[in-house]
Image (cartoon, rainbow, N blue to C red):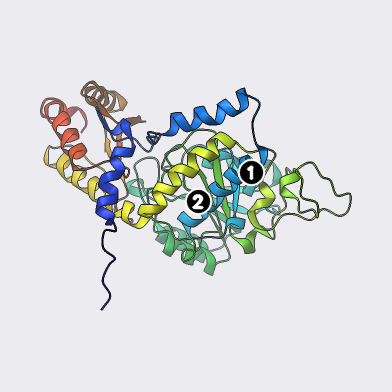
Amino acid sequence: MTHPAKNLPTTDTLLRDARDLFPGASGQTYIDVASRGLMLANAPQQAYDHLQLRVSGRADKTAYFTMAEAARTGIAHLLNCHPDEIAITKNVSEGLNFVANAIDWQDGDEVLVCPGIEHPNNLYTWRNLEPRGVIVRYLPSPNGELSIDAVRQVLAGKHCARVLAVSATSFIPGSRIDLDTLGEVCRAHGVLLVVDGAQSVGVSHIDLGKTSIDAMAMSTQKGLCAAYGMGFLYVRQSLARTLRPQSLARFGVHVSASHEADYDAGPIVLQPGARRFDLGNYNFLAALLVKNSLDVLNDIGTAAIDRHVTRLAQALADGLEALGAPVHRPACGRRANIVCVPSNNGPAAAAALQSHLEARKVRVALRRNFVRFSFHLYNNDDDVAAALNAAQGWLKQHRGSLL
């Protein structure tokens, strides 16, 4: 029998201690990672030191590239894929557009989307292909979720689908798709599964070594707890080899020379995998900050983070229901880190509840007619209790306005 090494911290200890790394978790109840994640306490000093090197004229470009590669390696480790399958982008929208515009579309090809639950940027990306003869086909979203049975039904019939574009977790009402099953369905029918990972990466456990996702775009300001202006794009190696970027720069081309300004006049040889989508200089400051937060996330592991945040979300959902709130309950999928309270009478009541919570230092989001709570690793049971405490009085007096 093997025994754990002595003095090694447990996952529970790492999660408890992680809260201390995020000062924004103190003095308020911050349940809003779906808008943006809290940043590490050392982020301002790290940013200052980085910028001070520029101010003093002592910037080291070689060290900058090392930073960017460390960030690429960190996200690849988090998702269990190869660093060559990761491109560095500005945001989710750019990553989705890179993939969409690199596919060899034929007139009449279809993209399947579920507009009832998708962020607009996972719709405009594909609708922009309509002038090229691509048909954007809408799927239903009963109960605010994409039904995998509905996908099966479409793919079993007459179709010309090339891509199914979905969010791993929708921004509202927080529906979590079964990516393992959906990936198997898509692969069986020769359809590419392209995922918007904005609300899931860093929060939910996604293992790209096991789950058949073909491409996934993500950003660094939400679950990765870093700055705006940077993202990553995962593209499976086998797919990347078939994609021709519509925008190309030196970093996306493989040349024998090593300096970033070197040029090879011979035939263009694209970088392996997703690296062919890298464009120009990276956001080196954002790369530094996300590299540091990825170290924290990788130390704990997303499997543990996932269990932690879904437990908190379930506890909050149960507590809000006990207070009479009309909480959205997942039907097809399972609970993610997001809890949404809808107002069936329009957005005014939802806005009033959000304002009530904000006045009591409970930070949540308002999206359409939903009040949205979203947990990350720095949240704990005290946050659940504080949110329920703050909501109780308002719900007792105004619950009927939500129904």
Residue that extends furthest to the right in the rendered view of this protein = 265
Q: x and y percent of residue 196 in the render?
A: 49, 47
Query: Between residues 158 and 48, which one lies in front from this camera angle?
Result: 48
Q: Residues within 10 Å of mark 2 (few under 14, many from 20)?
A: many
Query: Between residues 114 and 96, which one lies in front from this camera angle?
Result: 96
> What residue is rendered at 56% in x and 58% in y?
214
Residue 126: in sight, yes or no?
Answer: no
Query: Quick check: 172 left or right of 236?
Result: left
> What residue is rendered at 26% in x and 26% in y?
354
- Mark 1–mark 2 distance (CA, rounded to whole Å): 16 Å
Q: Secondary structure at mark 1?
A: helix
**Residue labelled with disc 1:** 65
Query: Quick check: 388 left or right of 363?
Result: left
> What residue is rendered at 33% in x and 55% in y?
333
Dot label at residue 345: none
Q: Count the marks: how many?
A: 2
Q: x and y percent of residue 367 in the render?
A: 36, 31
Q: x and y percent of residue 39 in the render?
A: 40, 35
Quadrant containing the N terminus in the rendered view = bottom left
Query: Quick check: 42 left or right of 236?
Result: left
Task: Tell me which amino acid carries mark 2.
Answer: Ile
Task: Tell me which amino acid carries mark 1.
Answer: Phe
The reply to whether dot 1 and dot 2 touch (C-beta < 8 Å) is no
Q: x and y percent of residue 20 in the render?
A: 29, 38
Give the foreground label among 1 and 2: 1
Q: Quadrant of residue 398?
A: top left
**Residue labelled with disc 2:** 75
Q: Residues within 10 Å of mark 1 (few under 14, many from 20)?
A: some
Q: Quadrant of residue 28?
A: top left
Q: Earlier in the sequence, mark 1 or mark 2?
A: 1
Q: Secondary structure at mark 2?
A: helix
